[in-house]
Image (cartoon, grey):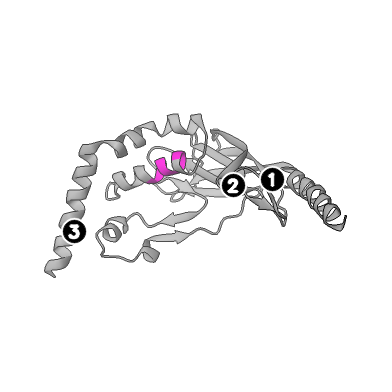
Amino acid sequence: MNAEFAMLFRRILCFFIILSAAGCTTTVRGRVIDAETGEPVEGAVYAIHWYYLRGCCLGIRFGDGSGYRKIEVADGFTDADGYFEVPKYGHTLIMPPIFRMGVYKKGYVFWDDEEIIKWDKVDERNAGKAKWEDVYLPRKWELRDGMIIRLNPWKDSYSRYTHAGSVCSFSGITGVDSNLFRKTVKSECDFGSDRKNRKDYMDYIKKLKEQKGNR
């Protein structure tokens, strides 16, 4: 009897945990600006994906114990003054909702909420001439009302091939199911999937490695 009561208690408790995990939501407003000039960036596409991981809760399994379950995807373009609005879900101690967010505009470096990439060092890293931790840095980001996202202008010295991979990874591999984002970054993805572009970049990296070996 005690075992049956304990199992019933777990199920009831887990039911309320699930409700709280996908519950309270608000809308927060942010702005996208040029990192160098401080001017607003109009027409930047943004996408945010809210989800929670599948798994076990107090001995009760949900789904297959892997992957994620989508809560909401929101996307759009920044207005003439660079403003945008996205949903924000309240956090809980157990099974908290998780988000991934990205912002892209042609002529700028892709921005995402998880990491800062030193694009002037990426080729050196791929050629083994720089450490991973010196190129890819965790971003300390807080999703809040009044947030400012600074887009760095693109420079011809940056690796477009690697940049395209970063953009398309966010769009596809991370599960950000936004048709608007995918359509906007299609040219980047096409560039990154082109075999000639890949070969040209690999040849370039090979030369950098050989230069390193000759020193």
Q: Which residue is mark 1?
A: 89
Residue 169 vertical placement versus 10 (above, below): above
Position in image of residue 115 (x %, y %): 47, 55
Cα gap from disc 2 to disc 1, whole angstroms: 9 Å
Rendered image quadrant of residue 6: bottom right
Q: Dot 3, crowdedness within 10 Å: few (<14), some or many (≥20)?
A: some
Q: Which residue is mark 3?
A: 208
Task: Identify which residue is drawn at 45% across, 42% down.
Answer: 173
Q: Which residue is mark 2?
A: 99
Q: Please tell me whether mark 2 sits on a helix, a strand or a loop.
A: strand
Q: Are marks 2 and 1 in contact (CB under 8 Å)?
A: yes
Q: Please tell me which of labels 3 and 2 falls first in the chain.
A: 2
Crowd around label 1: few <14 · some 14–19 · many ≥20 (10 Å): many
* Residue under the point 76% across and 47% down: 20
| Residue 199 counted in the magenta span | no
Q: Amino acid at mark 3?
A: Leu
